[in-house]
Amino acid sequence: MKGSVCSLLVLVITSVLLTASPGDSSTEAPVRNFNAVLGQSVTLRCPGNLSVHIFRLYLQMQRGQTDYFINGFDTARSLPVTEYMNRTEVNQTDLSVTMSNITVSDEGQYKCIVFYTEMPNEEHVINLKVTAMYSVPTLMAECIHVNGPATGGKSCQLSCSSTGGYPWSEVEWPGLHPSESDNETESFQDPHSKTWTINQTVTYYCDHPTNVSCSIGRTVSHTITICEADSFPLRVNIAIAFVVTFVLFLVLVLVLMKCHCRRPRPNPEDPALGVPLALRRAEP
């Protein structure tokens, strides 16, 4: 009786170890992630046991609740023709599908199904992420003088814009901390290419020269210096010059008037002026 119990325990322990073995074929395969650049090509490889005979491979894209056939191969029959046939190429040797001229609509989740002759089929999930580099951001600044100690003396309106990127991205100002209440972001997605155009305008207060740059989607703009005397608009310099000229003109007028008032007036009784007119008229 005791020997039977021991044998039963050994059998149970052995079964548990085999079930928990990492080589168990029932373990779900991890999701495979691929990155593609807009307009370029990407090769999606499906895991599979190449040591046994594979007679069919399907690559399908999940669109909502349905699977849309992309491409693959079947040794027994021809496959349906889809819109992807002209820009996909299947390699039966390594179970891969190369997709060219990548668009934003290609982004999403795919299902790869491998059919074996003498073993169960395998399904693998593939996630494809599409990216597009933003153009080098255009950075512009317009600065004016402002009053009040809290503003730092000068206010600069900074504008950063870039186009042709995907996905949508935040605008970053390295080393700069503009007021969030003065931020204004505008974005537009092209209806055809699905790429983004992003523009952000911020207001920054400063009292000394500051180097500024911005970045959108990891693309960095050139660096400019703001809060310098020559960084202010021409109209501000003209106004300042006009005020200074007007003040100098007033000072000059006042000096001339003061000099004129101090000039000595001639005395009618002065002998140097000759005989008074009234006396000359009285002479015979």
Image (cartoon, rainbow, N blue to C red):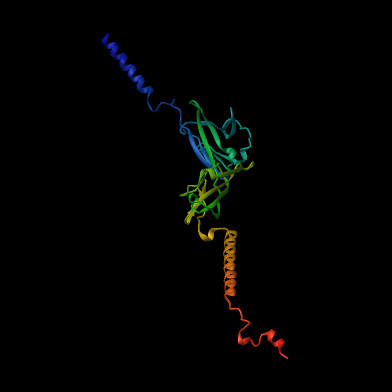
Residue 13 in view of the camera: yes
Q: Looking at the image, which is closer to me, 152 or 169?
A: 152
Q: Position of residue 52 (x, y in %)?
A: 47, 31
Q: Position of residue 79 (x, y in %)?
A: 61, 32
Q: Position of residue 95 (x, y in %)?
A: 51, 36
Q: Is residue 90 above or below residue 175?
A: above
Q: Looking at the image, which is closer to me, 267 or 54?
A: 267
Q: Position of residue 161 (x, y in %)?
A: 57, 49
- Residue at the image point whose x is 31% and y is 17% from the top: 10
- Residue at the image point whose x is 45% and y is 28% from the top: 28
Image check: 192 left or right of 22? right
Q: Looking at the image, which is closer to me, 206 or 22?
A: 206
Q: Is residue 171 above or below residue 50?
A: below
User: Where is the C terminus found, in terms of image quarters?
Assistant: bottom right
Classify residue 198 by image quadrant. Answer: top right
- Residue at the image point whose x is 53% and y is 61% from the top: 230
Judged from this view, the residue extending furthest toward the right is 284
Q: Is residue 166 above or below residue 258?
A: above
Residue 136 in view of the camera: no
Judged from this view, the residue extending furthest toward the bottom is 284
User: Where is the N terminus found, in terms of image quarters?
Assistant: top left
Judged from this view, the residue extending furthest toward the top is 1
Q: How many marks?
A: 0
